[in-house]
Image (cartoon, coloured by chain):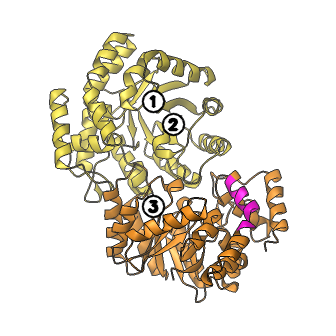
Chain colours: A orange, B yellow
Amino acid sequence: MFTGLSAFPLTPITAGSIDEQGFIKILARLTAARVDSMGILGSTGSYAYLTREQRKHVANLAKQHAGDIPMMVCVGAVSTDAILHLADDAQAVGADALLLPAVSYQSLRDEEVFTLFETVTQNVSVPVCIYDNPGTTHFTFTDELHGRLSSLEGVRSVKIPGVPNTQAAATERVHALRQHLRPGVTIGISGDAYAGLGLNAGCEVWYSVCGGLFPQMAKQITEAAAANDHERVTALTTRLEPLWSLFHKHGGSIRVIAAAAGLLGLTDMDCLPRPLQPLSAGNIADIAHVISTLELK
Amino acid sequence: MFTGLSAFPLTPITAGSIDEQGFIKILARLTAARVDSMGILGSTGSYAYLTREQRKHVANLAKQHAGDIPMMVCVGAVSTDAILHLADDAQAVGADALLLPAVSYQSLRDEEVFTLFETVTQNVSVPVCIYDNPGTTHFTFTDELHGRLSSLEGVRSVKIPGVPNTQAAATERVHALRQHLRPGVTIGISGDAYAGLGLNAGCEVWYSVCGGLFPQMAKQITEAAAANDHERVTALTTRLEPLWSLFHKHGGSIRVIAAAAGLLGLTDMDCLPRPLQPLSAGNIADIAHVISTLELK
């Protein structure tokens, strides 16, 4: 399941509660588009803002509406005990894989992160994807650590946060990381703005936020990548630059995707967990314009 | 209660559980030294690693053993809902004040942090101290934001993460911040290595990690500050530089203080919440040497 398009849907939260109907509508778009897998409760899925009970409920809802599409669930938390409980919950509701970031409060050492992954993989029966996201977790993986982690039997993929912004450098980056990984462990690009460079550099999977809302468009890109049509990958992703600019302007994708989900009528315009607040009316108008211009639907 | 020595004790965690007897022994040192207040479940108190239930239990234990010493409880969490629940719990067990950091996962905007503090102060009946700790929360307060927050009726103190490392610059820094604050809102220095500079710059309180384990020593320093004896403050804090060096070497104070608590026989040598791991035997020997040389007890 660690290839192709892995779509990471928003978890809409309205008036302090999970908008179940909104979430189900978003999931329906993913099953209709036949994404290759779903990444539930990723960063855009607001895992960090929800209680253990809410996270189990969201994962269960997703499983009920995922049909036969494999489901990965993020089990990120600061404490190892919390992660193990979340992993139990995710498996109990039918997660096919777990996504594990190194969320830090006190800064973490490599050995502490290695032991965390060792503990988790020893305690679960489904495969694990390493979630490398220094922007939110404030832990930076070295390639050597990725290599050590990939030697753990349960580890099957690495979700990287981006690549350098020329194709040659991106290809060199993915190649360098791959030298450290156990054969068979896939590399997935995330940071949607890097999708084209990452896929053309040989990443086997796109862990995609915009694919969690606009899966048809994202699937065209991963299908072009699977066909080794680098030019088409570049053309399709370059076309989306106005969307990447919005992500950049608003400090990441979550506020933009939340606004877009509201604009599509899938949930309320205010669907972010507090303390996060929706964007201003002016910014939302800009997002509406980009969605319209790019014919995203 | 936002003046003098506010001692921030470790919450010892052994074999995955709170070491209640160890915690009570640490608290007894604080009451014996007559610290001016206690800061329970601060960063070194591992709030970020504990469940809601564990945090309520720790706060309750502290209240039972604090005697007449005022108790502030940290209610930090990523989500506003979680913070409000933690604030309810802390007040229910008798917290005299709340310490509120701006813990981030997605990056926070100033307006979001302002609304968070506004919401919390409107929902609690005890005063609130702003916890400015960018090293762990990854949110940076501007002086303007501190000023706006200090206009909220419930806000009574600001815990700052440090000051520039010359006395003139430190004094200018504290003076500049004070221009923004509502009169009566105190400024507290933290980052123990900055205690001398901060107190001599006019900070009214030392929010102190080492004071959470070595309160007699810390109280000598805040008493010298209260007597305006700047030279004695400088002498007493400069003497502790080997301890500050250990904090710096080990990426903060928590691993060093945990080792010191073990060396004093108050708890086990392994008393950190996973994924954090205790320091190596060699590093612990260095800590024992510094404790002995400085006659910390």
Most prominent secondary structure in the magenta stretch? helix
Q: Nearer the viewer, residue B255 or B80?
A: B255
Residue A5, position in %: x, y? 60, 78
Gap between marks 2 and 3 measured at Cα: 22 Å
Q: Which labelled disc corresponds to residue B265? A: none
Q: Nearer the viewer, residue A19 or A171?
A: A171
**Front disc: 1 or 2:** 1
Q: Is residue A186 above or below residue A16?
A: below
* Secondary structure type for disc 1: loop
Specify the segment rendered in magenta.
A238-248
Question: As shown in the figure, which amino acid type bears the numbered disc 3?
Answer: Ala
Question: As shown in the figure, which amino acid type bears the numbered disc 1?
Answer: Gly
Residue A32, position in %: x, y? 70, 85
* Secondary structure type for disc 3: loop
Q: Which residue is mark 1?
A: B162
Q: Residue A79 colored magenta?
A: no
Q: Which residue is mark 3?
A: A77
